[in-house]
Image: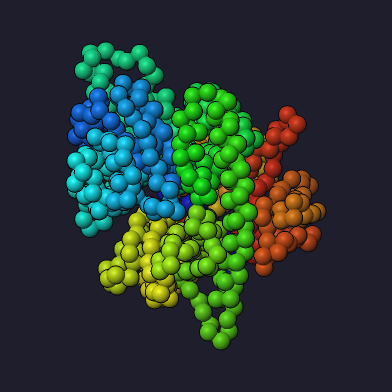
């Protein structure tokens, strides 16, 4: 597939005050930021706690169980783990008598508050179950809890189905009719809002501020969960992430995050959102993918460095195991894609790709779907065996295709084809009968084709345009690094330009180290392209002209900060790219 570069254009110019780097001003303008006020990440800019619907009933329900037994039921990803740890820590600090947690093992119980999980939870005799990052589709599980006399508070951010569960209270910014101004809250963001409201209510009742640390001290967990779940970084989420990063950099984070940073070779002092996304979150997620997310929650709940380090070591080992499994599965998946696209007899061209192998691991199919999606630039669902008759799939999508809505449309047009599904715009999960996989694959392909006619955005890569030679500098890289947090829907700045490759060599079997030079500049730059493959084999480009899509990186080596170009795409020279309108 030949990629086409499209340069972002700014809807309005950023009013320069001279305080920001000119490149950063252009980048902000291309993301719709048109004033320095929009860059204020103080807590004063956070949407008021009371504007999230369901907050007050949720607080009253929680306070009614303050002297009873509360059980927090989490999810098996990083958002679920951080949500769970945040609620447990917050309720305990607010003086709740008994707060425990339970994370379903995905291989035994699947996703959400199922009747089986309720039966397991009932053995602990809770008076209240609080779901975090799940529950909005758990109709049967909520009914089972209520039948046992257990009250239920659902806190979630996933899109609801046609019928809501009969919980005592539901807090979810994506409920129909919600007027809350940030529907992009992650599960941990929803949990944070509720815990902040609980602390506020207790302080109001006591007519004084509590002497114990406030809920804002748990924003390190909010930042990690928000970044890990790849939710859009709207203005509200950027405040949450920026505040969390600030606390981690200052050393005011839970021992578990500090241990995970250390084991991944990251320093807290200059931490970025990307460090959370690519170093900390994968190690935390590995517990839910390979073993049991209980380990991850315990790490985030650890109160001393030694315990946190021991649990972080276990998470790191699980992550290594996950990487090995994923590498094998990814090669098999890409081989299947090549067979689909390379079959001349069938002339197969899929808008939506479904992949399945008997040997695939349930916990890693989401990562495989993500990697293949990046390669083929179209929505992908990877399936693994759930039991003798059922498959469990994990879907990843591209801009322009709301994957949860795609599954909803298929379920409406083909009743009974999908057993269960849930998720949001860019990621979703589902289960279906193994015997109906081919039928589903055809329906998925057709529905994706309807949502995104033709090649659409899958053949394009957006950049922030070309940099002048003097702008390719360490000072620019440092300004961009400090200008975040960057993430989903507020992408890290990337640029394109014509360079001559002066030298290139393979390092670490699949990474390409280069020295590149803009034409007639007389200056050369250190550059690296990670995981650069062609036809799934390492490829070292020859000397000569290439169009690069790259990011500016501050590379720290032996105590010295240097500029490095992180190359995302190496493309043949071509006419000037288009500009988006």
Nearer to us in this view, 540 or 549: 540
Tell me which corner region of the image, top left, top right, bottom left or bottom right, holds residue 269: top right
417 relative to 556, above or below:
below
Q: Is residue 45 visible?
A: no
Q: Position of residue 307 (x, y in %)?
A: 55, 28
Q: Residue furthest front?
A: 123
Image coords of residue 124 (percent x, y): 31, 36
Residue 499 locus on image (x, y percent): 71, 55
**Picture quarter with the C terminus:** bottom left
In this view, 280 is above or below 88: below
**Is 438 placed above or below 143 here?**
below
Q: Is residue 139 visible?
A: yes
Write down the quadrant of residue 212 in the picture.
top left
The residue nearer to you, when weighing 177 against 334, is 334
Q: How is the image coloured?
A: rainbow
Query: What's the residue at 58%, 25% (across, down)?
Result: 306
The answer to whether residue 498 is above or below residue 103 is below
Q: Nearer the viewer, residue 519 or 217?
A: 217
What residue is drawn where x is 53% and y is 23%? 304
Q: Residue at x 71, y 48 (%)?
A: 527
What residue is drawn where x is 60% and y is 36%? 313
Residue 561 drawn at (x, y percent)? 70, 33
Q: Answer with left or right where residue 538 lies relative to residue 137.
A: right
Instruction: Locate residue 254 relative to residue 313 in the image: left or right.
Output: left
The quarter of the rendered structure image containing the N terminus is bottom right
């Amino acid at each position: 597939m030949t990629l086409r570069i499209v340069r972002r254009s700014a809807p309005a110019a950023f009013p320069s005050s001279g305080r920001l780097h000119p490149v950063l001003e252009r980048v902000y303008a291309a993301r719709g930021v048109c004033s320095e006020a929009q860059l204020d990440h103080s807590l004063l800019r956070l949407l008021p706690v009371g504007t999230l619907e369901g907050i007050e009933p949720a607080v009253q329900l929680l306070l009614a169980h303050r002297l009873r037994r509360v059980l927090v039921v989490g999810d098996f990803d990083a958002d679920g783990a951080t949500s769970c740890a945040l609620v447990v820590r917050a309720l305990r600090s607010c003086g709740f008598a008994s707060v425990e947690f339970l994370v379903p093992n995905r291989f035994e119980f699947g996703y959400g508050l199922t009747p089986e999980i309720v039966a397991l939870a009932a053995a602990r005799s809770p008076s209240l179950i609080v779901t975090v990052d799940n529950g909005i589709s758990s109709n049967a599980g909520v009914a089972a809890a209520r039948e046992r006399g257990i009250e239920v508070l659902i806190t979630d951010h996933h899109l609801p189905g046609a019928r809501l569960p009969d919980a005592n209270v539901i807090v979810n910014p994506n409920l129909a009719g919600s007027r809350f101004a940030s529907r992009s809250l992650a599960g941990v963001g929803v949990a944070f809002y509720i815990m902040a409201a609980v602390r506020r209510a207790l302080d109001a009742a006591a007519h004084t501020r509590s002497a114990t640390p406030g809920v804002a001290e748990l924003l390190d967990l909010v930042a990690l969960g928000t970044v890990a779940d790849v939710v859009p970084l709207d203005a509200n989420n950027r405040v949450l992430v920026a505040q969390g990063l600030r606390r981690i950099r200052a050393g005011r984070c839970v021992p578990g995050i500090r241990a995970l940073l250390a084991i991944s070779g990251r320093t807290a002092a200059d931490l970025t959102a990307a460090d959370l996304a690519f170093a900390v979150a994968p190690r935390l997620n590995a517990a839910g993918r390979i073993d049991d997310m209980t380990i991850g929650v315990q790490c985030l709940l650890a109160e001393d460095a030694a315990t946190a380090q021991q649990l972080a070591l276990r998470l790191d080992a699980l992550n290594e195991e996950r990487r090995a499994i994923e590498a094998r599965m990814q090669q098999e998946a890409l081989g299947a894609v090549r067979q689909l696209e390379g079959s001349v007899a069938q002339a197969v061209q899929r808008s939506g790709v479904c992949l399945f192998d008997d040997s695939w691991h349930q916990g890693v199919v989401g990562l495989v779907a993500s990697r293949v999606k990046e390669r083929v630039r179209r929505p992908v669902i990877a399936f693994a065996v759930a039991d003798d008759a059922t498959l469990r799939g994990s879907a990843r999508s591209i801009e322009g295709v709301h994957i949860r809505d795609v599954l909803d449309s298929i379920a409406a047009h083909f009743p009974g084809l999908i057993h269960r599904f849930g998720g949001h715009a860019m990621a979703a999960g589902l289960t279906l009968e193994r015997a109906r996989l081919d039928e589903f694959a055809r329906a998925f392909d057709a529905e994706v084709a309807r949502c995104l006619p033709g090649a659409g955005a899958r053949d394009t890569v957006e950049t922030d345009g070309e940099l002048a030679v003097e702008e390719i500098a360490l000072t620019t890289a440092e300004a961009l690094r400090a200008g975040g947090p960057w993430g989903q829907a507020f992408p890290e700045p990337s640029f394109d330009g014509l360079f001559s490759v002066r030298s290139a060599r393979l390092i670490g079997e699949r990474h390409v180290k280069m020295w590149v030079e803009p034409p007639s500049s007389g200056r050369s730059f250190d550059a690296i392209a990670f995981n650069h493959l062609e036809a799934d084999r390492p490829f070292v480009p020859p000397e000569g002209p290439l169009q690069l899509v790259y990011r500016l990186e501050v590379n720290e080596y032996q105590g010295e900060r240097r500029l490095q170009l992180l190359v995302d795409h190496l493309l043949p020279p071509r006419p000037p790219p288009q500009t988006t309108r």
